[in-house]
Image (spheres, helix red, strand yellow):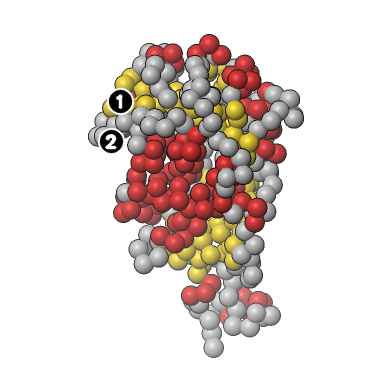
Amino acid sequence: MTQTTPSDKALVPFVSVDHMMQLIHHIGVEEMMRGLADYIEADFRRWELFDKTPRVASHSEKGVIELMPTSDGDVYGFKYVNGHPSNTKAGLQTVTAFGLLADVASGYPVLLSEMTMLTAMRTAAVSALVARTLAPKGSKTMAMIGNGAQSEFQSLAMKAILGLEEVRLYDVDRAATEKCAANLAQSGLRVTKCTSAEEAMLGAEIITTCTADKQYATILTDNMVGAGVHINAIGGDCPGKTELAPAILHRADIFVEYPEQTRVEGEIQQLAPDHPVTEFWEVITGKRPGRTSDKQITLFDSVGFATEDFSALRYVRDRIQDTGFYHPLDLLADPDDPRDLYGMLQRAKS
């Protein structure tokens, strides 16, 4: 029999950017944030099952390209992601990404998805999950310092997961602040546009820093940070890129995803290799304490880790069922006889 079309088992669901946006609107932005946080928390609770390795990075003067792999023993996943801060000058995204899940038993892919939009959603969901665990109880106000592509997602995730009521915006580029404020105008959040980082931090229990420049920067100085706050530092995410003055790190209790990666890429690259940190999964599972006092400064030194992307892809795989928000992709060769790949090629002539 001449094989002209692939069988169903050879078709891999592909979620395009358009499909991802349709899925997000179908579920609802805030509801999806909560769903992603649930999946991410569940995988933090089974952290010890995962294969873990720092991401594989290729650095250049312009930016970085990375692969982020992991597996829980049944499913394998990876994400391709870049970070090129100067891209915006050419009208390009700073970050783009796609990801894949595969069945470990057969090695066959089971999902291919865009992850530029999904990474923004999952990064924000992680921030809010951690803040719900570490920030002062009843936190209602966040300073959002850096109002680029991630800022709206961070704000909405904090609202959806933490009950945030006010976000105070600051960016050195006033146009970025205006953009963010306009996008959040109908969100239900009280939005305040500020003219300095210090002004943005007034009354904020949570401080999120998310700037893009690939350099050792001091977005927050030591005297700007008072007792009792939670700092969500997500902008420093590669070697040579930081946002916080080292003195802040010495005053804070630091929480990380995976120390072997964060010590190279995060804020703590500024500290001694043996400086104590707490892995967030240990807090989630009760092995280590989180916030222990009202005066404590908690710092989430977030660089993003493969298990979080794995969680996000799992969520998408489960939620696209029966929605039509994917395209069956002819990605795998599927000859009638698995040993006769060449025969399949020959039959394709007809």
* In this rendering, position of residue 216 left or right of residue 141: right
- What crowding class fits label 2: few (fewer than 14 Cα within 10 Å), some (14-19), or many (20 or more)? some
User: Which quadrant would the N terminus be assigned to in this image?
Assistant: bottom right
Give the SS element for disc 1. Answer: strand
Is 46 located above or below residue 132 in the figure? below
Taking the view exactly as shown, the residue that stands out farthest to the front is 293
Horizontal and vertical percent position of residue 332: 57, 68
Compared across the picture, whether 202 is left or right of 70 comes to left
Taking the spot 50% from the left edge, 13% from the top edge, the residue there is 224
Residue at 40% from the left image edge and 22% from the top image edge: 204
Amino acid carrying mark 1 in the image:
Val
Q: Position of residue 240 (x, y in %)?
A: 66, 25
Q: Which image quarter: residue 84?
A: top right
The image shows residue 57 at horizontal and vertical percentages of 67, 40
Q: Identify whether 311 is placed above or below 244.
A: below
**164 or 286, nearer to the observer:** 286
Q: Which residue is mark 2?
A: 187
Tell me, for residue 59, which label it has, or none.
Answer: none
Whether label 2 touches label 1, CB < 8 Å: yes
Most extreme residue toward the top, as rendered? 223
What is the spatial separation of the Cα atoms under label 2 and label 1, in whole angstroms? 9 Å
Residue in the foreground of this view, choosing between 89 and 275: 275
Q: Looking at the image, which is closer to me, 4 or 163?
A: 163
Residue extending farthest to the bottom is: 1
Q: Position of residue 282 (x, y in %)?
A: 61, 43
Residue 285 visible, this orientation: yes
For the point 36% across and 16% down, which residue is it? 194
- Judging by the rendered image, the residue that carries numbered circle 1 is 191
**322 relative to 71, above or below:** below
